[in-house]
Image: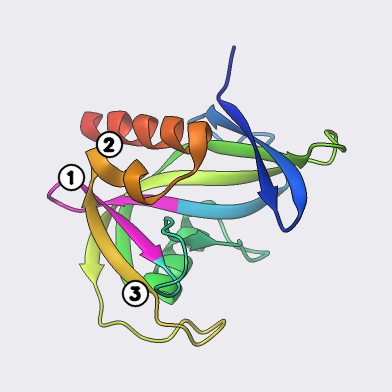
Amino acid sequence: MNYPTNTMDWNGKEIVVTWIRADSLKDITPITQVYGICFNDKNEILICRRNKDSEWQIPGGHPEKSETTEQSLEREMVEEVDVKVKNIKILGIQKAYPKEKPNEFIYQVRCICEIDELLPQTPDPDNGDIWERRFVPASEVTNYVKWNMTGNAMFKDAVKKFSKN
């Protein structure tokens, strides 16, 4: 099967990223990120950025040792963007590795979920930042979150899966 793949620069290293649509995380390790594509009741997607000079992204972060994927996402949503979510479902994974070391890969989980509650914004406990958050129409999310071909495929899959719920 052909999966969308692109190469990106990450801190001066060429990283190969492949989007793989999946409903299960069986045998997927190591997982280094859990991010959420969060929909509100208007079919808009939540995006965020650390400050006005940062790029837009979707919220999420690194799982802690004893957490499930769902617990990681729930915690990161509250810490970063002060949002409670519900109906979390696995959407897929990004497999990422340095171009010169294809056997040193990691997995980054992507989920879809629904916004349950917007909380008053507070500083992120990791760094003290108050993240800017914004809802954008699902059809326009790639105008903000510019993650190349893999990101475009991920958002397309998210909209398709969410519309089936």
Give the answer, above or below, for where 94 lies relative to 46.
Answer: above
Circles 1 and 3: CB atoms closer than 8 Å: no
Where is mark 1, residue-wise?
A: 43
Circles 2 and 1: CB atoms closer than 8 Å: yes
Q: Please give the name of the residue rendered at 23% of the width and 58% of the height, measured from the top-left corner.
A: 135
- Can you give x and y, in whole percent of width and height, for residue 36 in the image? 42, 52
* Residue furthest left in the image: 42
Secondary element under disc 1, as helix, strand or loop, is loop
The C terminus, quarter of image: top left
Which callout, 2 or 1, points at the residue further toward the start of the chain?
A: 1
- Can you give x and y, in whole percent of width and height, for residue 40 in the image? 20, 53
Where is mark 3, residue-wise?
A: 82
- Can you give x and y, in whole percent of width and height, for residue 116 in the image? 23, 62
Q: Please give the name of the residue rendered at 45% of the width and 71% of the height, measured from the top-left corner.
A: 53
Give the answer, above or below, for where 100 lies relative to 84.
Answer: above
Secondary element under disc 3, as helix, strand or loop, is loop
* Region in magenta: 36-48
In three-dimensional space, the C-alpha distance between marks 2 and 3, rounded to whole angstroms, equals: 22 Å
Q: Amino acid at mark 3?
A: Asp
Secondary element under disc 2, as helix, strand or loop, is helix
Nearer to me, 82 or 24: 82
Where is mark 2, residue-wise?
A: 162
